[in-house]
Amino acid sequence: MASASKSAVSTSPAARASASRASSFAMASMAQQRSIGPVRCADPEWAMRLSPLCLAAAVLAGPATPALAAAPACTPPPGLAPSPVLDPPAREVVSGVPVAAYVLALTWTPEWCRAGGAGATAKEMECGRPLGFTLHGLWPDGAHPPYPRFCHPAGALDVATVRSMYCRTPSPVLLQHEWQAHGTCAAWATPQAYFGQASALYDRIVVPRIETIPANGLTAGAVRAAFVSKNPWLTAEEIFIQSQRDDQDALSGVRVCYDLKFKPVAVRAAMARRTARG
């Protein structure tokens, strides 16, 4: 069946070599992208001044939460089970912070796996097959730090939710974390409502095959241009390319920012220490 994530990496030798290139790319020519670090989404005064940070995907009609959409074609492994409930340390719990915006996070899985980001169990699901951009999560964002996290107690996800999300987010541990850390910090009453909203935003983005970009032109600007070519309603100024903090030549993901009605918005580059948190 088709790969579980968007723009799955081809398994041909040439494509594998290109995919390896795509996990390491030059930042010297970033097509005016001033910052390649993490981003924030909740400062409107920077909307016309900042470097291109956010991918403006489809505009939803309003804040109503959709049902879980049909996942991309793949087959969840037998015995796929929910992860245990997390017990976050007290310093990680930040409740009572008004939500000012939302961040949709896409992870470039080849770099995640190359950097050893997955544990032994997750490695088989996330790194044992060719994947492209997977859904990391949907994060409520505050106007200022501290940012909302683990706002309310939450139980374990049910197996149906884990299976329905597997083709977008092939990690029960990450799914549990995203629901507890972020899904509890806005108006989503259930995990199904939270993941339904995240899925609707993710599913509307057409992701290019970045491993086909020529080696001598593989820059953040080229990746951004490839997204624009597949999403003609976008402009380059609305797309942010994320890199690893410890390796500025390593593509790690794309960030998309939305307002409270889930309409795409631009973000500021200052105080950019947020999106690596997940």
Image: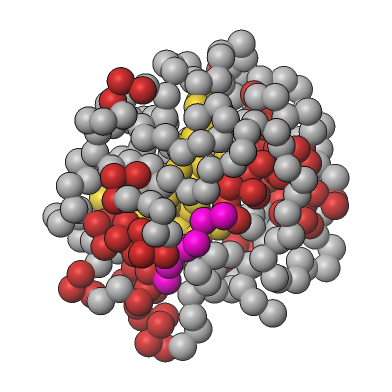
Image height of 214 relative to 71, above or below: below
The reply to whether residue 114 is visible in this rendering is no
Q: How is the image coloured?
A: secondary structure
Relative depth, front residue between 74 and 65? 65
In the image, the segment drawn in magenta is 204-209
Residue depicted at x 39% and y 59% = 232
Relative depth, front residue between 104 and 153? 104
Q: Residue furthest bottom?
A: 13
What percent of the width, then of the height, locates residue 197? 66, 41
What percent of the width, then of the height, locates residue 152? 72, 20
Left or right: where 52 falls relative to 84: left
Q: Residue furthest left?
A: 28
Type of secondary structure dominating the magenta stretch: loop
Q: Does the magenta-highlighted stretch encompass residue 269?
A: no
Image height of 51 relative to 151, above or below: below
Residue depicted at x 25% and y 67% = 218
Residue depicted at x 65% and y 31% = 63
The reply to whether residue 162 is visible in this rendering is yes
What percent of the width, then of the height, locates residue 153? 76, 22
What percent of the width, then of the height, locates residue 5? 58, 64
Q: Quick one: quadrant of the N terminus?
A: bottom right
Image height of 56 relative to 164, above or below: above
Relative depth, front residue between 2 and 81? 2
Residue depicted at x 64% and y 77% = 2
